[in-house]
Every structure is written in structure tokens, then in C-alpha cells.
Amino acid sequence: MLRSGICLGVAACAGFAVTAAARAEGLPEALAKAYQTNPQLNAERARQRATDENVPQALAGYRPQIVASLSSGLQAVRDLLPDNTIQGATLKPWVIGVTVTQTLFNGFKTANSVRVAELQVQSGREALRNVGQGVLLDAVTAYTNVLANQSLVDAQRTNVAFLRETLEITQRRLKAGDVTPTDTSQAEARLSRGLADLNAAEVNLAVSQATYTQVIGNPPTQLRAAETVDRYLPHSRDEATNLAFKENPAVIAAGFDVDVATTSIRVAESSLLPTITLQGSASHSIDSDPSLSTFRTDQASVIGQMTAPIYDGGTAASQTRQAKEVASQSRLVLDQVRNQARTAALGAWVANEGAKIAVTASESEVRAATVALQGVQKEAAGGQRTTVDVLNSEADLISAKARLIGAQRDRVIASYTLLSAIGRLDVKTLGLNTPGYLPEVHYQQVRDAWHGLRTPSGQ
């Protein structure tokens, strides 16, 4: 009797030796590898580290700007003196100086720019979490597809062996005069169909193994049964919807995007306000012109400056209006993402509940089809059934097994899909044996960096 809710891949795992079992790779191990090595996820982590750099760039507006200058060259001079004589000289002037500029007020542009950058970091972290969920779900799908296709190949091989045996029995009965040549032809036709189905199953297995290698990072070896994650799932449809609204990373990221767009309005408006700067400079120059009484000049100055825009052709006003429209767009996008999250959560909940029913029904179908085949075989041996009845009963059984294998695969994927829809498909929830990636670590490393070209990773 088949167990209700049995894990996918029992047929693929049965009969393994102890050493093979020691090398077996379970779904948690595969998910840990994908989390560590998947190129898509690692690329998203690099994108997030680049987004972190927006904050120190914005904070630079609070810091002084220091510029050093050095000029030197040759200068030919011809002077016409009052007595109409010409005096010429070749000069070698040079000047060295340093200028320090500190912005005291810029219409709160720096403060708002820092806020925008910080909100972009928050939004990027949620986008990274969303990609991480997608990669883990892809890994679950790839893993269960390999298990399902392995089971289908085994089932088709068993089917081919049965059809060969049936053909041999039919041929012996034909020689004994118990059946007609038509029965033999029917058995041969079903065997050819079984061989074609086996070939198709082997092709699908090869494709799923290649996909597994792409997502997980290594070819599948001996895979263990995949379990569902029902213990982490909500208990009602309403709970699933509420969790999706609160914890789905796409929804949270869209909320941060609204804050980014709203704050960007104030950044644009800062161009309409005055700017106050304080500039200090010092220079040292030498001029070898013999007609001058001064050959060396040292200068130092501190200058405060305020500039107020009067009219810039309408650029700042246009940028402000543009930022307001972007903010309106981001609010509409947030509503759209919320609707999508609600639909995804409802769909995942219904699919998961439906997958439970499908597994139970498929198990009952396999049991009934097995009993039916055994009965038809006995009746055929007694002359009460024909060869085609046996072949049809076997076809019903193999179809039932294929549906059960597909239902078991869909059952596992559906549970992980629902976990992803509520925003909890992550390393911590699953308890994977791998350290979680912490984007805030890199953020703290670069946030207050005043200088340096190397990344925290040493690049």
C-alpha cells in the first residue's frame, strides 16, 4: 500500500548500497550549493554591493573638496618701452596652489540625496532576497524534475520488460494455436510504443540533469527523496494573503521605491534654493620677468559665497514635475505588485491544496490499476480475456504511475512555491547548512569610507 504524502523519488532511491547512500545528495544540500554558487544570485549580490556605494557618494556632499594645482611653462615677452626701444625676455613662470571648498548649505540636497541612497539600499536588499527566493525555487524544481524523470525512466523500463514478456507469451500461445496473429501484432505494436516512451523519458531525464547542473552547480549524483515544507506554511488562505502583503520581498521593495521617488522630489526642489559655500585657497608663484619689481608671490584667502538661482530656463522646475510623476508611477506600481503578490499567494495556496488531493487520488488509481492488471492477467490465462485486454490494463497502470510521479513532484514544488509567495523561502527558514549572505556587512564596510580604491573583498 502506498503511503499518503510519500516523498518524491522513492523508486529512484530504492536498493542503494550503504556507500551509495553516503554519497547521496538531499534537497537541503542541493539548495545550499545553489545558494552559494548560483551565478544569477552571485551577480545580484554584486549589484547590491554596487548599490551600497551610492551612500558614500551621497555623503561626500558633506565633506570638503580639496584640489591641488601646478602650472609651469615658457613665456616669450616683448615690451615696447617709452623710448621706442624693444625689450624681450623668455620667462619661466610657475604656480602651485591648493583650494579647499566646503559646502555649507545646498538646499538640503545632500541630506535628501543620502536618504535616497539609503532607501535604494533597502530596496536593493529586498530585490536580492526576491532573487534568492527565485533561485531556491528553481533549485527545488530542478531537483524534483530529476527525481521524477528518474522514476519515469524506471517505470518505462519496467513497462518495456512487461511488454517483452507479454510478446513472448503471445508468440508461444500463437504456436500452440491459442491466439491469432492479430494478438501478436498488437503485442509488437505496444512494445514499440513502450520503447518510444522509454526513449522520450530518457531524453527528458538528460535535459533535467543538464538543468540541475546549471542551477545547482554540479551534476546530480544519487538524489534522496524530496520532502515538502508544510510545517512552515500558513494554515489558511487569508493568512497566506496577509503574509504575502507583509513579507513578500517584491512588495517591500516596491514600498521602498515609493519612498525613493518621494524623497527624490525634494532633491529636485533643492535646485531652486540658494547655495552657500566656503572656499579657502593658498598659492605660491614665481615670475622671472625682469621688468617687474616682484618675482615671487604668496597668496592665501578665505571666501564665503552664496548663489541663488533666479532663472535657469525651466530646468529645475521640469525636473521637479518629473520627479512628482515618477512618484505617482511608483505608487501605482506598488498597488500592482501588491495585487500580484495576493494573486500569487492565492494561486500557490490553491495549487498546494490541489496537489495534496492529486497525490491521494493518484495513489488510489495506482492501487486499483495494479489490482486490475493482476486480475486481467489471471483471466487471460484462463481464456476469459484477450491479449489486448492485458495490454490495455498495463497501459492504464503505466499512465497511473506517471500521473502519481507527476503529482508527487508537483506536491513538493507547490509547497515551496507557497513558501516563496509569503516571502519565507530563505536559508534561515529552511535551516540550510550554509551561512546566510548578509548584505549589511558590506554596507557598513563602505558607508563611511573617505578614501580607498580596493573593495572590501580586496579587488
Image: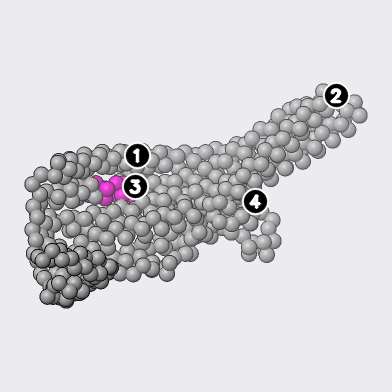
The CA distance from mark 4 to mark 1 is 37 Å
N-terminal-most mark, 4 or 1? 4
Q: Quadrant of residue 317?
A: top left
Q: Quadrant of the C terminus?
A: bottom left
- Disc on res. 250: 3
Q: Quadrant of residue 219?
A: bottom right
Residue type at numbered disc 4: Ala
Magenta stretch encompasses residue 112: no
Left or right: residue 233 compared with residue 258: right
Whole-percent x, y for residue 314 in the image: 14, 41
* Residue with the mark numbered 4: 12
The CA distance from mark 1 to mark 3 is 9 Å
Mark 4 nearby-residue class (10 Å; few <14, some 14–19, many ≥20)? many
Whole-percent x, y for residue 449 in the image: 29, 69
* Residue with the mark numbered 2: 181
Q: Secondary structure at mark 2?
A: helix
Residue type at numbered disc 3: Ala
* Residue with the mark numbered 1: 340
Residues drawn in magenta: 246-259
N-terminal-most mark, 4 or 3? 4
Residue 364 appears in the picture as rendered: no
Left or right: residue 199 compared with residue 341: right
